Image (spheres, rainbow, N blue to C red):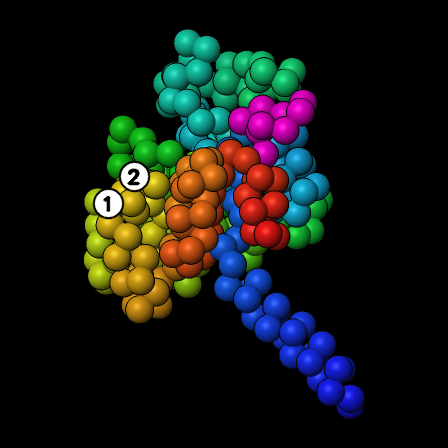
Amino acid sequence: MTKKLILAASLVLAGGAASAAQPKVIAHRGYWTAPGSAENSLASFTRADAVGCFGSEIDVWLTSDDRLVVNHDRVYKGTDMEKSTFETITAIELPNGETIPSLDTYLRLVRSKHSTRLILEMKSLTDLNREDLAARKIVEALRAHDLLDRTDIIAFSINACLAFRKLLPGANIYYLNGDLPPKSIKKLGLKGIDYSVRVLRRHPEWIDQAHELGLEVNVWTVDSDEDMRFFIERGVDYITTNYPEKLQAMLRE
Ligand code: MG
């Protein structure tokens, strides 16, 4: 090999190593800021996949008749996700003209794409027994669609995190609530922390602490240039954003 070739090869290797250490981009509630999209819509997953996001996040509720639907707000257009039926909820129109999708419909779409990971948030419920039921039903649905290997689970509820851990030992489960230091998350046997910008700005040391414990770090919702730069420099593993293409462009710089 000539000197030039060796130099070129080492540059490629160095570039590869550097990009491997970059945070992975997760679209928050899907890529809903894209044209024709809406939060938690089917289009939001399609758009996240089309621009090559590492992952696309959704929020999942258990309805009053024990079905699973994909939506963020507890009360949306006057309808309470926990207290209403599947039929009522899935008739509600989203801003892009779709209706609120069932988890089943959503998973069928995810299955049809081949690279983008699903980041599934189970919303906290008022009754812990119902959280356990929701976790069981979510696992059943993921298994039925053969998506267990392509899904990460996130939750604010410790009860939900532990219910998933019991159902899926070894699964990627991240805690959202921001009130526990990494050493507690390690003890609970979770994969990592998925904390807000506010929490990780207050406790930037938790990022290195988590890594030293072998945990992963995700941060939400990172939309400003300043926050994006801060968390890229801090070396988090994942950044969850409403503006995935802006973040991707920054990572390419
Ligand atoms: Mg969410």
Q: Quadrant of residue 185?
A: bottom left
Residue 108 against residue 93 in the figure, above or below: below
| Residue under pointer 2 | 198
**From the viewer's perspective, is 119 left or right of 73?**
right
Residue in the picture at 65% in, 74% down: 11
Q: Callout 2 environment at 10 Å: few (<14), some (14 to 19), or many (20+)? A: few
Q: Which mark is residue 98?
A: none
Residue 142 visible to the viewer: no
Q: How many marks?
A: 2
Q: Amino acid at mark 2?
A: Arg
Q: Is residue 57 above or below residue 189?
A: above
Give the left or right position of residue 205, taking residue 119 as reference. left
Q: In the rendered image, which quarter is residue 79 located in?
A: top left
Q: Which residues are magenta?
A: 31-39
Residue found farthest to the top: 78
Q: Is residue 36 magenta?
A: yes
Q: Residue at x 67, y 24 (%)?
A: 35
Q: Is residue 52 magenta?
A: no
Q: Position of residue 226 (x, y in %)?
A: 42, 41
Mark 1 belongs to which amino acid?
Arg
Rendered view: 91 above or below 231:
above
Mark yes or no: residue 240 visible: yes
Front-lying residue, 231 or 125: 231
The residue tagged 1 is: 202
In which image quadrant can residue 190 be found? bottom left
Q: Tell me the CA gap for discs 1 and 2.
A: 6 Å
114 or 147, which is in the foreground?
114
Q: In what element is the residue under mark 1?
A: helix
Q: Position of residue 207 (x, y in %)?
A: 32, 57
Q: Position of residue 179 (x, y in %)?
A: 21, 45
Q: Residue furthest bottom?
A: 1
Q: Position of residue 1 (x, y in %)?
A: 78, 90
